[in-house]
Amino acid sequence: MKEISSGCIVYKIENNDVYLLMILDRFGKWTFPKGKIEEGESLEETAIRELEEETGIKVKIEQYIRETNYSYTDENRGTIEKTVYWYLGRAESEEINPRYGEIKEAKWVQIDFATELCGYDSDRDTVREVYKILSDR
């Protein structure tokens, strides 16, 4: 079975430091907000909706970053082949209002420490890509 999701790596700049919004998922790993596409939604609309639903943060999408692919096992549906399309967005609000149940926690993390906190290898690669994008500006 195939599944498509979309997510957003959200950043803010504070005192010349870049911070990324990270969430603690239901598996106890630090990652980034993402979710399944609803009927009629674009990938960008999904990324924005999921971010706001999970964290309360509003964002302005700046650009597409990359896609990641992985598989996982669901006890009811079997093996799921998942593709996630990632976007970079600048926070338009900073106060986090996590939606518990969807996630366990959310916080702003300085970009230099984000790769250490990431619970998934593909997220580390995505953070490195974000670092390059923001450094080139």
Image: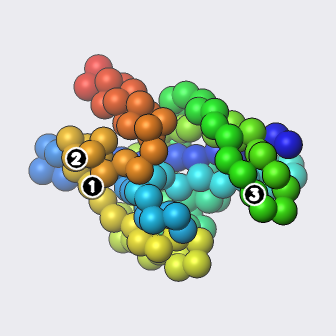
> Does dot 3 land on a helix, a strand or a loop?
strand
Reading the image, the residue beneath label 2 is 113
First-in-chain label (2 vs 3)? 3
Residue 120 located left or right of residue 19: right
What residue is rendered at 45% in x and 65% in y?
A: 28
Residue 36 is situated, as x and y percent measured from the top left of the image, at: 73, 53
Reading the image, the residue beneath label 3 is 74
Residue 72 is situated, as x and y percent measured from the top left of the image, at: 68, 47
The picture quadrant where one finds residue 137 is: top left
The picture quadrant where one finds residue 26 is: bottom right
What residue is rendered at 66% in x and 54% in y?
A: 35
CA separation, marks 2 and 1? Answer: 7 Å
What residue is rendered at 41% in x and 57% in y?
A: 30
Mark 3 crowd level (few <14, some 14–19, many ≥20, 10 Å Cα): few
Badge count = 3
What's the residue type where badge 1 is placed? Val
Mark 1 crowd level (few <14, some 14–19, many ≥20, 10 Å Cα): some
Q: Is residue 133 visible?
A: yes
Reading the image, the residue beneath label 1 is 109
Quadrant that contains the N terminus? top right
